[in-house]
Image (tube, rainbow, N blue to C red):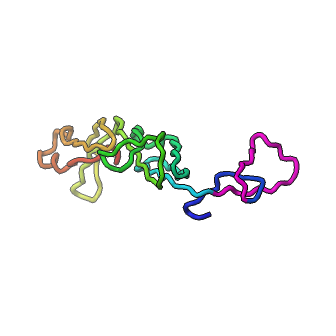
C-alpha cells in the first residue's frame, strides 16, 4: 500500500468494493478476503506534549473524524487548531477537507500545587542542608517567581539568587 493509500475494508471478490460485514455474516467455511484499497489523505495530530493520537485517513473531499481528546498532566484539552500559533482558528470537524492536514492540540494550564525547597550549601563540605520549604500553587506552564517567600534569614542578594523563575510544569 502506497503512502497515499489505505486499506478501507475487506471484500470477498478481487478488486471488489462491497465491504464484507464481519458483524452480521457468519463464517462457517474457509473464505478468501481481499483488501479494499483507496486513495486517501491523512490527518496528523500534534498533541503538543499530550498523549499520542494515531494519524487518521480520509477520502479527499471527506471529513476528518474527531479523535478522542488527548490528555496531558496539569492541563485541560482546549481543542484542535489549524496551526501551532495563538491566532490559529479552531478546526471544524464537520467541514470537508481535500488535502493532508496536521492539527495541533491547544491546552489550558490547570492550577497545580508544588513545593519549593530551600537548601543551603554547607561551608565545610560539598553537601547541602535543608533550610525550609514553602507550599505554592500556580498555573501549569506559566512562569512564577518564589523570591517573595524566601526564608527571612537570607540576605536580599541570596534571595534574588535563589530562584529567578521557573515553570510550574517543570517541577
Name of the residue lying farthest toward the right: 29
For the N terminus, which image quadrant? Answer: bottom right
- For the question of whether residue 157 can be seen, the reply is yes
Residue drawn at point x = 80 percent, y = 57 percent: 32
Q: Nearer the viewer, residue 105 or 82?
A: 82
Residue drawn at point x = 48 percent, y = 39 percent: 94
Main SS type for the magenta part?
loop
Q: Is residue 155 left or right of residue 8?
A: left
Name of the residue lying farthest toward the bottom: 2
Residue 34 included in the magenta stretch of the image: yes
Q: Which residues are magenta?
A: 15-37
Quadrant location of residue 135?
top left
Residue drawn at point x = 40 percent, y = 37 percent: 76
Residue drawn at point x = 28 percent, y = 40 percent: 133
Q: Nearer the viewer, residue 169 or 129?
A: 169
How far from the left and from the top, in percent, is residue 51?
Answer: 48, 47
Tell me if residue 15 comes above or below residue 112 in the rendering: below
Residue 44 included in the magenta stretch of the image: no
How far from the left and from the top, in percent, is residue 8?
Answer: 64, 52
Q: Is residue 85 left or right of residue 148?
A: right
Tell me if residue 115 comes above or below residue 46 in the rendering: above
Q: How many marks?
A: 0
Q: Nearer the viewer, residue 77 or 65?
A: 65
Amino acid at each position: 500500500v502506497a503512502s497515499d493509500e489505505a486499506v478501507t475494508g475487506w471484500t470477498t471478490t478481487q478488486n471488489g468494493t462491497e465491504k464484507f460485514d464481519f458483524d452480521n455474516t457468519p463464517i462457517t467455511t474457509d473464505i478468501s478476503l481481499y483488501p479494499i484499497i483507496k486513495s486517501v489523505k491523512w490527518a496528523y495530530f500534534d498533541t503538543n506534549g499530550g498523549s499520542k493520537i494515531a494519524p487518521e485517513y480520509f477520502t479527499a473531499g471527506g471529513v476528518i473524524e474527531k479523535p478522542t481528546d488527548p490528555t496531558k498532566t496539569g492541563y485541560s484539552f482546549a481543542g484542535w487548531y489549524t496551526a501551532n500559533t495563538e491566532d490559529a482558528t479552531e478546526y471544524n470537524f464537520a467541514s470537508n477537507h481535500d488535502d493532508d492536514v496536521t492539527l495541533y492540540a491547544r491546552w489550558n494550564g490547570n492550577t497545580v500545587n508544588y513545593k519549593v525547597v530551600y537548601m543551603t550549601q554547607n561551608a565545610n563540605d560539598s553537601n547541602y542542608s535543608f533550610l525550609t520549604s514553602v507550599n505554592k500553587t500556580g498555573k501549569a506552564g506559566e512562569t512564577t517567581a518564589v523570591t517573595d517567600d524566601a526564608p527571612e534569614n537570607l540576605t536580599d542578594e541570596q534571595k534574588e539568587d535563589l530562584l529567578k523563575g521557573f515553570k510550574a510544569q517543570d517541577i
